[in-house]
Amino acid sequence: MIDIRLIREQTEFVRSRLAARGGEAHLRVEEILECDRERRSTETRLQQLQSDRKRISKEIGARKAKGEDTASVEAEVRGLGEDVARLNEASALLEERQRDLLLQLPNLPHDAAPLGEDASANPEIRTWGNRPDFSFSPKSHVELGESLGLFSFERAAKISGSAFVCFTGAGARMERALLNFLLDLHTQQHGYQEVSTPFVVKPEALVGTSQLPKFEEQLYRCDRDELYLAPTAEVPVTNLHREELLGLDQLPVRYAAYTPCFRREAGSAGLGTRGLIRMHQFDKVELVKIVQPEQSFEELDRLTADAERVLQILGLHYRVIELCTGDLGFGACKTYDIEVWAPGQQGYLEVSSCSNFGDFQARRMNLRFKDSEGKNRFCHTLNGSGTALPRLFVALLETYQQPDGSVMVPEPLRPYFGAAKMG
């Protein structure tokens, strides 16, 4: 959530940064300011009435002490009390409306974010490794998975519908191997603390990490319990410290967590038609950081490097792109996407999106820290996939496939998988 004081004091700056995102978010600024002016005016009037009522109440006491008639003054106090009650209600409604308006406003892109309208303007920052060469025509992961019995979409559809998968045999074992490999890497080598959180979350947790109210239609909701299935581990993990005041000695916080992720992906073109690439449920290891503002962009670079290290160890060719202003996620101010090469798709697949949210999420969840001068300030939050398993699985199958239809297992994964190849 953007600080209302920033909107109030640097209105044109806020408008220009929102306009850089495209869309109509910058047009909402005046409505927010109008609501803010009305709320502040109401609160000023309320404070004046409360002061008047207090003063007159003292006057009643003084008159009674002198034996004077106070009926008219008491009537005036009762009238002021009614006005105070009315203004209290109006102030609460205006405060709620202002918060609702602010919650609908996306984050401001960082000044250094490249300008652009959509993904076509995202600059490539770097690449690693080379695209694999094959002496045969490479198969897609769907063909490989079916021939090796690694997963079944048909059986999953019988129990859950389209865009779900059931991993079987070596496929299920590889899924488990990847989870353990990723968690061990990030906790033992990259300094993250492993946490295991609930897979269902309260609405306020989704508000805190900016999935609500913006992405309500993308979420699975358990209406009877007023809970949602977590769309990503970012939600429960970042909210572990909601409404807390952290000490400097507690920062930076670095967490790694596995969760299944549940997304309705309403309206997504091609959902369920491209194998493992886009599904309603998938596994992911998420990296979350809570840091001091002065360290957040340095921590973003480290976060991105940690996610990249996964692909380097597994020998997978990838590229890193930076998202332009028009392609940034709702809550992010700066984002790097890591895209792995999938030979069977003849294209890149996003396996991690590493974002700095500044204090945008922290303001929504009232997550603060006490700085060296004793001042309470909002933390900066970051997260990134470390990585998303389905597309990592796709890249591994398609990159390490052999002419005989088998798939070699990269050496670092063999202790986890228990074999050198599938098939």
Image (tube, rainbow, N blue to C red):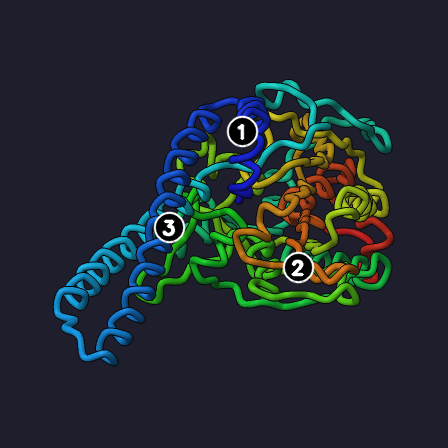
Relative height, residue 216 to residue 240 (above, below): above
Callout 3 amino acid:
Glu
Whole-angstrom CA distance, mark 2 to mark 3, is 24 Å
- Regarding residue 271, the answer to whether it shows in the image is yes
Quarter-of-image position of residue 370: bottom right
Quarter-of-image position of residue 173: bottom right
Q: Which residue is mark 1?
A: 11
**189 relative position to 293: left or right:** right
Q: Which residue is mark 2?
A: 376
Is residue 179 or residue 329 the one in the foreground? 329
**331 relative position to 86: left or right:** right
Callout 1 amino acid:
Thr
Disc 3 element: helix
Q: Which residue is mark 3?
A: 43
Crowd rating for badge 3 (residues with CA inside 10 Å; few <14, some 14–19, many 20+): some
Callout 2 amino acid:
Asn
Crowd rating for badge 2 (residues with CA inside 10 Å; few <14, some 14–19, many 20+): some
Marks 3 and 1, the one that precedes in the sequence? 1
Image location of residue 22, percent across then percent down: 52, 22
Image location of residue 194, percent across then percent down: 72, 66
Residue at point 78%, 34% (across, down) = 318
Image location of residue 300, percent across then percent down: 76, 44
